[in-house]
Image (cartoon, grey):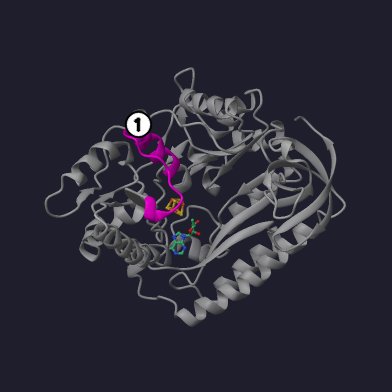
Amino acid sequence: MNIYDSTRMLDILRPLGYLPVHAQDDADLLILNTCHIREKAAEKVYSELGLVRQLKNAKARRGDHMIVAVGGCVAQAEGAEVLRRAPFVDLVFGPQSYHLLPELIGRALRRAGGGVLATDFPVEPKFDHLPEPSVQQGVTAFLTVQEGCDKFCSFCVVPYTRGAEYSRPVAEVLAEARRAVASGVREITLLGQNVNAYHGKGPDGRPCGLGGLVRGLACLPGLGRIRYTTSHPQDVDDELIAAHRDVPELMPYIHLPVQSGSDRILVAMNRRHTAGAYRRIVERLRLACPDLALSSDFIVGFPGESDGDFQATLDLVDEIGFAQAYSFKYSQRLGTPAASAADQIPERVKSDRLAALQLALDKQKRQFNEACIGKVLTVLLEKPGRHDGQMVGRSPYLQSIHVAAAAERIGEIVSALITDASANSLSGSLAEAVGA
Ligand code: 5AD
Ligand code: SF4
């Protein structure tokens, strides 16, 4: 979502004369678009700012001015702290304020004393005030359809940094998708912190769910593939499951975070689903779409997690079988309920559990990739690979696939016979084109 947000920031800055540059040194305006989800991500911002300060000083010595802005969720959550720790920062703005960038930059340019801080949640949705997205560069694109979250999992900062749930109207999403397809996009990934809580205003004025939105998008000629991320188990409804059964453009892949396999921990996390409910959802999805591949997020070392709770997570992994997954050590986030829990888990235990979980998940990923050898998979050719004459694309299951193909074929959906698999990618040889 930050990548998408950065492209939309560029859209609003272009009319002011700003263009992207490749070297930071050439920039008149440098924006760090930041993530606050775990402490590590937030700390990265301050170390990066150390380098930016040197850059800004060096430019100043040459008589050049550089505006430094910090956007995104770190700005939202600890904007005043950013200005305190890095007083050379001219502007701090939250994720709901980037449509105000022209005005904010104007204020930053005129600034007399401290930096400009813009972290209120504006009343009007930013999407109404952003210019149309500029021409797409590649054959795949992100499209934010939903933002914010009302779930309040007890470990998570998102409801505080991104604000309340908001869904863009169907017509707006379709218009943005149509423009993307017209500029060469063949695959769209619908984005939202809670994408399957999507309930945008439909053409009939009534709310439309994600399944309905997917069906609408699938009617756009030229759009070959649709994906979405990230989903919450509680919001997987019949309509979405039916879309996985009926819509060939919807890729057979779902990123469905479970976080833990222990009901006791899921309650403490305020996840609103049990491990059993998760298993049943997966079963229904697989019934509707037998080749569906699953991805997930896991947190280990949540406060109070016992060896037994962690074992329940390993059991769930074993039972479900994931094509790939992300796993994290629990990170205390100030202001979230779990941060003040008394029974925090020692770092060493967290590290051991993470290593054990990642071992299991890596093994499943390898097995999933190896099971593709000998199969014919469709590939959307995206860009040249590292070797001459080689192109890279993605399988329906989001695996990278390397094939020998001409560069003119970028943007085509071809089929490839998979001949080799490694931990992170597949390679194959081109079969016939299917729906170029
Ligand atoms: N600590 C560790 N991981 C977290 N996530 C969210 N908040 C935290 C936290 N405090 C993980 C969850 C979520 C993913 C985006 O980041 O697994 O699904
Ligand atoms: Fe955070 Fe996702 Fe929970 Fe919302 S549903 S609070 S974004 S982990």
Seen as rendered, the residue at the extreme front is 62
Q: Is residue 279 visible?
A: no
Q: Answer left or right for 222 relative to 20.
A: right
The x, y position of residue 226, in whole percent, is 63, 36
| Nearer to us in this view, 332 or 282 | 332
Residue type at tag 1: Pro
Residue 168 x/y as whole percent: 43, 31
**Where's residue 33, x and y in %?**
38, 51
Q: Quadrant of residue 248?
A: top right
- Relative depth, front residue between 312 and 362: 362
Q: Is residue 172 magenta?
A: no
Q: Which residues are magenta?
A: 6-26
407 lies above or below 153: above
Q: Is residue 265 above or below residue 24?
A: below
Judged by its main secondary structure, the magenta piece is: helix
The residue indicated by pointer 1 is 15
Asked if residue 113 shows in the view, the reply is yes
Residue with the most extreme top position: 204
Residue 3 x/y as whole percent: 47, 47
Q: Residues within 10 Å of mark 1 (few under 14, many from 20)?
A: few
Q: Relative to 426, say whether 265 is above or below.
A: below
Q: Is residue 12 magenta?
A: yes
The residue lying toward the viewer, choosing from 407 and 197, is 407
Label 1 C-beta lies within 8 Å of the nearest ligand 2 atom: no
Secondary structure of the residue carrying tag 1 is helix
Identify the residue shown where x is 55% and y is 56%: 274
